[in-house]
Image (cartoon, rainbow, N blue to C red):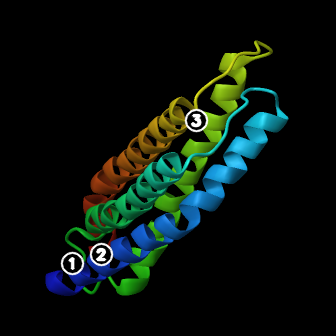
Amino acid sequence: MFTKYVILTVITAFLLLMLGFWSGPWVLVYIVHILNQLGLCICFVEAETTYEFSALVGALLATCAPTATVMLWAFSRKQSGWPRAYGFFLFLLPTVISAAAGIGFGLLSLKGHLGSVEYDISVWYALAYLLWWAFGTLLGGCGLITIILFFISPRRKRTCNV
C-alpha cells in the first residue's frame, strides 16, 4: 500500500512540476503587467527571468504533492481501511490553495510595502518576494493542518471504537 502512495505522489509531483513550467511564463507576464499597471515597477521580462520563474513555480507546485501525502499520513494514522487515493487528492486541494494564497499575500504585501513610492524594482526581487510568501504559506498552513490532524487521528481511533 505504501508503494502505491509513493508512486501516486511522484506522478502527481511530476505533473504539477510540468504544469508550473508550462504556466510559469504566462503567470510572470501577468504579474509584471499588474505591477506596471499599478505603477509599482517599470519592468521588462527577459528570457532568463521567465525560465527562472517557471522553475520556481514548478517547484512550488511540485511541493504540494509530498505535503498532501504527509497530511494524509497524519490523518490516516492508525486508521484501518483508510487512506484511499481520493484522500490524497482531497489533501492536495488545501496545499495548492495554500500556495496560491501565499502568492496572493505576497502581491498584497509587495503593494503595501512599496505604497505610492515610485522607483524601479527588479522582476527578480518581486518574484523572490512572492515565492518567499508562497513557500512560507504552504509550509506554515499545511504544517499547521498536519499537526492538527496528527493530534486528532488518535482521538478518532478512540471515538470510532467506542
x then y, percent, for residue 140: 41, 41
Q: Is residue 2 above or below residue 20?
A: below
Element under disc 1? helix
Extreme-top residue of the structure? 117
Q: Is residue 81 left or right of residue 36?
A: left
Residue identified by numbered label 2: 9
- Label number found at residue 6: 1
x then y, percent, for residue 121: 62, 24
x then y, percent, for residue 90: 48, 73
Choose between 12 and 145: the one closer to the eye: 12
Give me the C-alpha separation between circle 1 and circle 3: 36 Å
**Of callouts 2 and 3, which one flags the residue occurring earlier in the amino acid sequence?**
2
Residue identified by numbered label 3: 123
Give me the C-alpha separation between circle 1 and circle 2: 5 Å
The amino acid at mark 2 is Thr
**Of callouts 1 and 3, which one flags the residue occurring earlier in the amino acid sequence?**
1
Q: In the figure, residue 141 lies in which quadrant?
A: top left
The amino acid at mark 3 is Val
Q: Crowdedness of circle 3 by 10 Å Cα count: few (<14), some, many (20+)?
A: many
Choose between 149 and 28: the one closer to the eye: 28
